[in-house]
Image (tube, grey):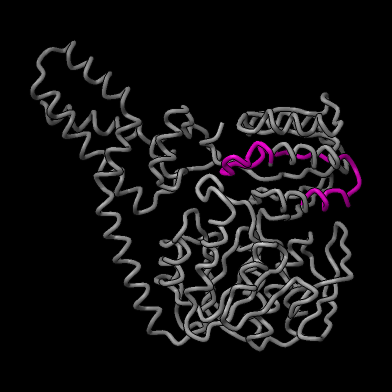
Amino acid sequence: MAILTAVICSIIFTCLSYFLVKTYQLNSYDIKKYITSVLNFNFSLGDKNKLVFTKRIIRFFIGVFIISFLIFFVINYFIKSVFAIILTYAVFLLLSPFFVVFTHFLLLPIEILIKKCYMKKAKRKLGKLKIIKIGITGSYGKTSTKNILCAMLEKEYKVCVTPKNYNTEMGLTKTILENLDDHDVFIAEMGARHKGDIEVLAKLVKPNYGILTTIGMQHLETFKNLQTIEETKNELVLNLEENGIMVFNGDSISTKKLYAKCTCEKYLACDKSGFSYADNINFDKNGSQFVLHIDGQTIELKTKLLGRCNINNIVTAATLAYILGITKEDIVSAVQALSPTPHRLEIIKSENLTIIDDSYNSNLIGASEALNVLSKFSGNKIVVSPGFVEMGREQSQANFKLGGLIADVADYFVIMNDTNKNELLSGAIAHGFDRKNIFFASSRKKQKEVLSLLTSHGCVILFENDLPDNYK
């Protein structure tokens, strides 16, 4: 009887732990961040971000079931009083958020061993292939630069690229093991939240070529300061293969600083004193036109992509493509055919309104560019944004600035979530924005209700950033 009761209770508990495990996953399996979410009662109860049933999560649920079964079996076998059993169950459920912490540490050695095995296998496979290996890192523009470079190189090579934002150890490992085949080029996007992360990824891939995109105040919650960010991104430069070549997007002071320190063969893009840059830039709601100066030559380019940041991404990608032998004609053709990276200044048009989807942007520089794009449109302009997170001590100031930037362009402002509500509101009002044109939405449902009242024929809605649903 105790076994059957324990099985039933364990199944129920494992199902109930869904939202706890989802919160754990949305915090990138970072147990410190998960505990912070628990202590602040920031559980992922909504359906904005669904739990992804990876192999790791399946193993985690199995662990939850087995451990809870043992606990329930002991309770039912040794405790005979019904009242005492109910009381013990109640205490167990009350402490259930910390059950995830216990399971995490119990399974951690297994997860580390599995990760090392997969990475070793991927590294061995990559080492046997005679291909061009390219690593891309930076604070902003990694995914867009990666996609643009892929489009250019595909004119000449067979290219394998890390999909979406697969930029972690297991993301790169999965791509190498499952996607990489008889390709000529492998492009690996490399992300980081802690010092040393890029070094691990670079040692896995051992790139022949590297691109460093714009560097800025990103993930300050874990990096703490700009110097640590610079040192982390420079790990790509320090771990290139012998005779490796680096391309630097010179649109930030930090990137130029690392360019000056770099001792391998290097090229500076997006700077008039460098190898390549863009000028005569013009853009409207349909796209951009500019002149690319590269290696003393000029190329006139047209693209559907919008914003100065995207143009810099094109210039940076074109620099490495040019170094790898892609012709001017093929660069022109590739740029003309480019489509926006989903959720990054992506224009979605309908008969009645236009949506600018910039929901994957999470920095002030990109937001400023998105608002500049919005300003080129006619009609009522509506901005929907929850602001920025993971910025440490800079978060309040960044969101105050964002509120002011939005006030300078928008007719209506819908503030999502409560996380940055006060800073965004204060920033907008400080720039003279009419308080009655500011609205609040704590859920997607509420957002739709507000937008249904605000939208009119010909209006433009900018969705600027999005937060996982472990943020209130």
Q: Which residue is depicted at the point 24% across and 28% down? A: 9
- Horizontal arrangement in the rendering, residue 84 relative to residue 291 (left or right): left
In the image, residue 95 lies at what x, y percent? 31, 26
Note whether 5 is above or below 196 in the view shown. above
Q: Residue furthest front?
A: 261
Note whether 422 is above or below 238 in the view shown. above
In the image, residue 148 lies at what x, y percent? 67, 71
Q: Which residue is depicted at the point 69% across and 72% down? A: 316
Q: Residue furthest right?
A: 378
- Horizontal arrangement in the rendering, residue 411 relative to residue 55 (left or right): right
**Quadrant the N terminus occupies:** top left
In the image, residue 228 lies at what x, y percent? 53, 56
Q: Which residues are magenta?
A: 370-397
In the image, residue 81 lies at what x, y percent? 12, 12
Looking at this view, is 435 or 333 the one in front?
A: 435
Q: Which residue is depicted at the point 35% across and 34% down? A: 17
Q: Is residue 22 visible?
A: no
Which quarter of the picture shows residue 276? bottom right
**Quadrant the C terminus occupies:** top right
